[in-house]
Amino acid sequence: MLILISDAFDSTLPQLLSKYGEVTDDKGRVAEAEVVLIRSKTKVTKEYIDSAPNLKLVIRGGVGLDNVDQDYTKTKGIVVHNTADASTTAVAELAFAMIIALPNHIAKADQSMREGKWIKKELKRTELYGKTLGIIGMGRIGTALAVRARAFRMKVLAWHPDVYFSDFAEIRPTLKEVMEESDYMSVHMPLLDATRGLINKEMLAHCKKSAYIINTGRAGCVNEEDVAQALKDGKLAGYATDVWLSDPPDGSPLFDAPNTLFAPHIGASTKENMTRIGQIADKIIFDYVNK
């Protein structure tokens, strides 16, 4: 059996998986591969699948599966797994780091000091204590974020299409209500037809002008042009994102917008998480081999 590691994983993974067969990172051998491990960079499209006639198992290191044509894999009998449990802590911690960094102007303060500027009077901070965090998508990561926000004595609201109760947040029946009540909003929805462009001009109109939005979920859930315009018009206080329509982004209207904070899709890229992803991939392949 040939196992193709198509994207960046922990350096120990090839040795860990070698007990199942040959392990390679040579993408030119995709036609031979029975198992392919991907992250966000590799796109398992119809064309990709047609180029891999021996493919039986795709493992996505991470949560989102929008880079896999799941309808077509089903027609080919290809099993698709993600490693959703692994990334919860890593992504929740990055989201909360961004929630802290935006109102404290951490990036702007650091940059100004390096430029020899002293802009103490210009950098007006606000506290998280007593503020309201609205979580858009109350799954594993949203729940982990809620736990962290409550430790900072924030009020936590949440909306999710099929979540009606949580021990960690007050569930609101509509996204509009969360947008209206929140000082901070953190996006943790999968990218589906129903969630594409979910945060758009219409929804942004319900935000407080002092509100911040953080996106460590999926870029396509947010209309970048609408967010950029809201920032320019002073209808939104700030926006932070770790996710992009392409990796790396081929330009974005957000780059010209004020009060932004960007990261290069590093939400899952902790040492600990990469180890966990490898362990879950090992278990998935073990079950596949021994089914």
Image: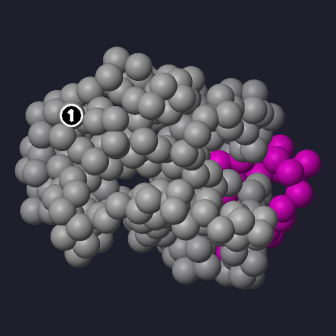
Q: Nearer the viewer, residue 43 or 144?
A: 144
Q: Nearer the viewer, residue 242 or 21?
A: 242
Residue, x 75% and y 32% (percent of image)? Answer: 251
SS at mark 1?
helix
Q: Is residue 24 left or right of residue 266?
A: right
Residue 85, magenta (yes or no) = no
Extreme-front residue of the structure: 121
Residue 42 can be seen in this image:
no
Q: Residue 190: x, y in percent? A: 42, 40
Q: Residues within 10 Å of mark 1 (few under 14, many from 20)?
A: some
Extreme-top residue of the structure: 202
Query: Considering only vertical position in the picture, is 104 above or below 34?
Result: below
Q: Is residue 3 left or right of residue 102?
A: right
Residue 209 can be seen in this image:
yes
Q: Is residue 35 left or right of residue 32?
A: left
Q: Which residues are magenta?
A: 17-42
Query: Considering only vertical position in the picture, is 246 above or below 88?
Result: above
Residue, x 10% and y 51% (percent of image)? Answer: 170
Q: Residue 27: x, y in percent? A: 86, 51
Residue, x 32% and y 49% (percent of image)? Answer: 184
Q: Which residue is mark 1?
A: 180
Residue, x 91% and y 48% (percent of image)? Answer: 28
Q: Residue 204: x, y in percent? A: 36, 27
Q: Nearer the viewer, residue 127 or 182?
A: 127
